[in-house]
Image (spheres, helix red, strand yellow):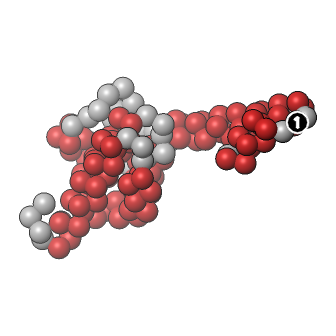
Amino acid sequence: MACLTNIEATDPVPDVRTAAKQAMLAVVAREKVVAVDALPKNIPDFEARKLSKSELMEYENQIDIDQMIHALQDGRAHVKINAARALAVRGDKAARAAAAMGLLMRDSVSAVRREVAVALGKGRCRRYGCGG
């Protein structure tokens, strides 16, 4: 994406700049479709607002790990936070999501980073009995 952005901004040929912009739009559109289509439909308000851990615990058996991994890639902070909280609710069963969660430790939104750290810490505390 950085390369396409640079080409779109600096190339002296207008057709090349236009092609670079169209390529960027195609990449962004494709990423959004994949993430949005994979979001959970069985948890009310998952996409609408930030859900509490207790709300998500009501749906513990319905939380799909793969859907949550896709939700971690969504552009909206509250959706990423919901996914992190849902994965924390699933505990050790969500271990395969650790890599995707680790990537969010560099997210631009501090609330997302904080929630992911809490979720990762909860899994560690459950496993090692550190009182979390």
Q: Residue at x 35, y 35 (%)?
A: 78
Relative depth, front residue between 71 and 10: 10
Closer to us: 132 or 20? 20
Q: Is residue 86 visible?
A: no
Residue wearing tag 1: 12
Residue 126 appears in the rendering: yes
Is 24 left or right of 76, judged from the image as shown?
Answer: right
Residue 94: image quadrant is bottom left
Identity of the amino acid at label 1? Pro
Across and down, in percent, residue 92 comes to 28, 64
Looking at the rendered image, the quarter that the C terminus falls into is: bottom left
27 is higher (above) or lower (below) than 98: above
Considering depth in this image, is 111 or 43 the residue closer to the camera? 111
Q: Residue at x 28, y 47 (%)?
A: 115
Residue located farthest toward the left when viewing the structure as drawn: 131
Position of residue 96 relative to residue 84, above or below, is below
At label 1, counting other C-alpha atoms closer than 10 Å, the crowd grade (few under 14, some 14-19, many 20 or more) is few
Give the number of callouts.
1
Is 16 placed left or right of 92 in the picture? right
Q: Residue at x 11, y 69 (%)?
A: 130
Percent across and percent down for residue 11 are 84, 39
Query: Could you tell me residue 110's position as x and y percent?
Result: 33, 43
Q: Secondary structure at mark 1?
A: loop
Q: Does residue 127 lie above or below 6 as drawn? A: below
Identify the image quadrant of residue 10.
Answer: top right
Q: Quadrant of residue 13?
A: top right
Instruction: Judge left or right: residue 1 versus residue 132.
Output: right
From this viewpoint, which residue is outermost toward the bottom?
Answer: 128
In-image side of 73 versus 65 (left or right): right
